[in-house]
Amino acid sequence: MNCKVCGKEIVKDPGAKLPGLEEAIQKYRQMCGIRCLYRTIDREIEEIAKYVRAKETWRKLREEDARKSKEFFASKEWRELRYRVLSSQGRVCTLCGATKESGAMLHVDHIKPRSKFPDLWLEESNLQVLCEDCNLGKSNKYFHDHRPKYIPEYVERFVKEDEQEESCQH
């Protein structure tokens, strides 16, 4: 039988004094000796190291994405745009009709998700109001636009209320 690492013929040394060497060699698929065993172990360690480095790189990328996302949602541009969308679309979930008054947490959702369409982050035409449950259910898997094709009366009511609030503040 030949060594699967170097191709040499395997010769069993009956006088081998290293305890466990024969079992280790058997475990590593019939190798001719300790050098081939170490080569195999070194390769396995390198494969593990590659995996660990890749995992660490992935973790750093995710942390960077989380940091950028936090900065985005804290930006003045996003907050102003979010306010405009909530005002124009009526503070009502466009999918299920839930409102803040009914206990729902409202989100301004990116129809085409930020993770896949970063150039549309601040496009008002890519935003819709969804409650937390609908938004988390949609995730970034679906690109459904649930906005009505017309502006219903309840939206007009909220726009008028916003205008009145703004005029009172000035």
Image (cartoon, rainbow, N blue to C red):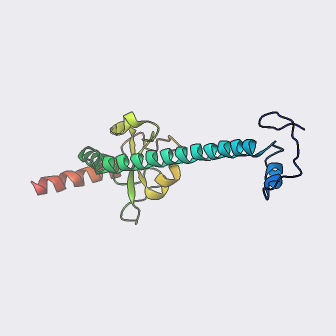
Name the residue nearer the viewer: 152 or 62: 62
Q: Which of 119/108 is in front?
A: 119
* Image quadrant where one finds the N terminus: top right
Q: Is residue 109 visible?
A: no
Pick out the residue farthest to the left. Answer: 170
Picture coordinates of residue 19 (x, y %)?
Answer: 79, 59
Q: Is residue 106 visible?
A: yes
Q: Is residue 104 above or below residue 62?
A: below
Q: Position of residue 51 (x, y in %)?
A: 59, 45
**At 58% across and 46% down in the image, what residue appears?**
49
Residues 121 and 168: in front is 121
Residue 74 or residue 142, whichever sits in front: 74
Determine whether, in the image, residue 27 is placed left or right of residue 98.
right
Name the residue located 81 percent from the left edge and 43 percent from the top edge: 31
Identified at 34% across, 52% down, the residue is 154
Q: Position of residue 35 (x, y in %)?
A: 73, 42
Q: Residue at x 36, y 62 (%)?
A: 100
Q: Is residue 154 left or right of residue 49?
A: left
Q: Position of residue 92 (x, y in %)?
A: 38, 54
Q: Is residue 162 left or right of residue 138?
A: left
Q: With respect to residue 38, does 6 lie above or below?
A: above
Q: How many marks?
A: 0
